[in-house]
Structures are given as C-alpha cells and as structure tokens.
Image (tube, helix red, strand yellow):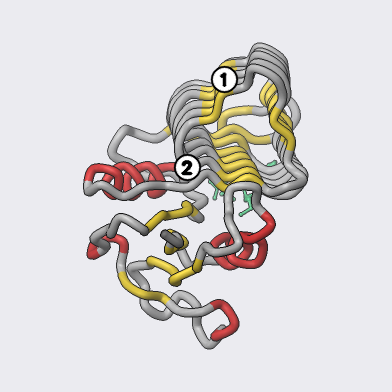
Amino acid sequence: MSRRIFILGAGGFGRELFAWLYESTSCRPDDHVAGFLDSNPDALGHRSDYGRIVGAPEDFRPAPEDYLVCAIGSPEAKLRLCRELQRKGAKFLSLIHRTAFVGASSRLGDGVVLCQGAVVTSNVALGSFVTLNVHASVGHDAIVGDGCTLSAHCDVTGRASLKEGVFLGSHATVLPGVRVGEYAVVGAASAAFRTVKPRTTVVGVPARVISERAANQSQK
Ligand SMILES: CC(C)(COP(=O)(O)OP(=O)(O)OC[C@H]1O[C@@H](n2cnc3c(N)ncnc32)[C@H](O)[C@@H]1OP(=O)(O)O)[C@@H](O)C(=O)NCCC(=O)NCCS
C-alpha cells in the first residue's frame, strides 16, 4: 500500500520540508504527498507550487495509509498538536535527510526531523518530535527532551541536557553538561554556560536571563 503523507504546518518550515521530503531516508518512491494540514487555510498564500492545504489538524481523521511529518517550530504548539493527533491514532514519520548523521547507540523518538547536515553523535537520546534544523548538532551522551527545536547551526555539546519543549535560536550553543529546563528559550547566537531554569529566556554570551514566564504564559 502506498502511503499518503501530510505535512503538519504550512509555514516557512513546512515549505522547506516539502522541498526535500523525497531526499529523506524514510520516504519511499511510491509515497504521495497529499498536502498540508494547517488551521489557517491561507497559510500558503498564492504559492501553488507547494500543493494545497487539505484541512485543519483538528479535523484530521487518519486512514491506515496516512502518515504525518511535523513542520512546526514552536515546541509548545508542536507538542500540543502532535500529542493530540497521536491520541486520535495518527502515525508520524521521522524525516531524516540523507546528509544527516546519526551515530552509534543514539536513540530517536517518534516524529523527529533531522534536516540537511544535522549531526547526532554518540549515545544521544532525542525524544519525540525533536527538530534539528540545518547543521544543528548534538554531542555525545546528550539528552534532548520531547518537542525541542534546535534552529539552524545550533551546537548542543556533550552531556548537555535539554528538558521537554526547549527552543534554541539559530547558532545557539549549550556548553558541555549544562542543563536547560522545560520550555526555556536560548536566543539566537547565545551560549548557555550554566543551568537555565524552566520557562526562562536567556540571551548573549554568556547567556543572561531576560525574562521568566509563568506556566500559563506561552513561549515565543
Ligand atoms: C531570545 C528572543 C526569543 C527574545 O525575544 P524577545 O523576548 O522579544 O526579546 P526582545 O527582542 O524584547 O529583547 C530583549 C533584550 O534582549 C536582547 N536580545 C534579544 N535577543 C538577543 C540575542 N539573541 N542575543 C543577544 N541579545 C538579545 C535585546 O537586544 C534586548 O536588549 P535591551 O533590553 O538591552 O534592548 C529572540 O531575540 C531570539 O533570539 N529568537 C530566536 C530567533 C531564531 O533564531 N529563530 C530561528 C529561526 S526561525
């Protein structure tokens, strides 16, 4: 049976994934991209080259041949939607570009996305719905919790630990053994030298706290 693939999220990242989906090691030649799921029916604008938005994620009812790939950058939105869809029986493909590298004894959760040049070295644990954008890397023995998003060129070094829902901006670095708490944000080009508390945003080199959020306030 050929598979129907739906891209969850028709924003910029969804369009990037659409461009290279068939270059991933997990896609088969007879897979068929059925379209995007997005609650904004105009999210693609006039870009008809990308196919179409077939419906909203909340209305999606998966058939046996249906698979989703997750193209949402915001960890909070990503985890909320993906978990809800999984509860409805949706299956997620992990999308691993053929130029990405996954080293020995590393473990990947469901629905991860590893873009061009992403590197997961030795004995790394990536949770479900983790996204590594282009050239992001995760060093030996590091742990990356469910839903984390590592933007392009991020460097999570050896033994670092990211809890659920962490967002790292482009070129962010987490130093060896440093812990980053749930739903924290490390800004673009910033470097976390020491523990980052949950729901805190840090920026700069070395990173300093610029804001803290309550549990009911959303992440940027
Ligand atoms: C960290 C971040 C989320 C903060 O956003 P914010 O809460 O709106 O913060 P503001 O823009 O109000 O900035 C607050 C202060 O932090 C500074 N700041 C913000 N981001 C910074 C960064 N990455 N590095 C250094 N300083 C930064 C601002 O200059 C400002 O300083 P000031 O108070 O002295 O003027 C955002 O700046 C960022 O880096 N986002 C990552 C974007 C990215 O890489 N996305 C991936 C591609 S989609």
How packed is label 1: few (under 14 Cα within 10 Å), some, or many (20 or more)?
A: many
Residue drawn at 41 percent across, 59 percent down: 1
> Viewer-proximal residue, 28 or 171?
28
Residue drawn at 45 percent across, 31 percent down: 146
Query: In the shown orientation, is residue 168 left or right of residue 104?
Result: left
Image mark for residue 143: 1
The answer to whether any part of residue 82 appears in the image is: yes
Furthest residue toward front: 1
Q: Amino acid at mark 1?
A: Ile
First reached walking from the N terminus: tag 1 or tag 2:
2
In x, y percent, where is residue 76? 39, 43
Q: Amino acid at mark 2?
A: Gly
Residue beneath disc 2: 111
Residue drawn at 23 percent across, 60 percent down: 61
Q: Is mark 1 within 8 Å of ligand 1?
A: no
> Which image quadrant is residue 172 in?
top right
Element under disc 2: loop
> Which image quadrant is residue 196 in?
top right
> Viewer-proximal residue, 52 or 191?
52
Query: In the shown orientation, is residue 205 left or right of residue 216?
Result: right
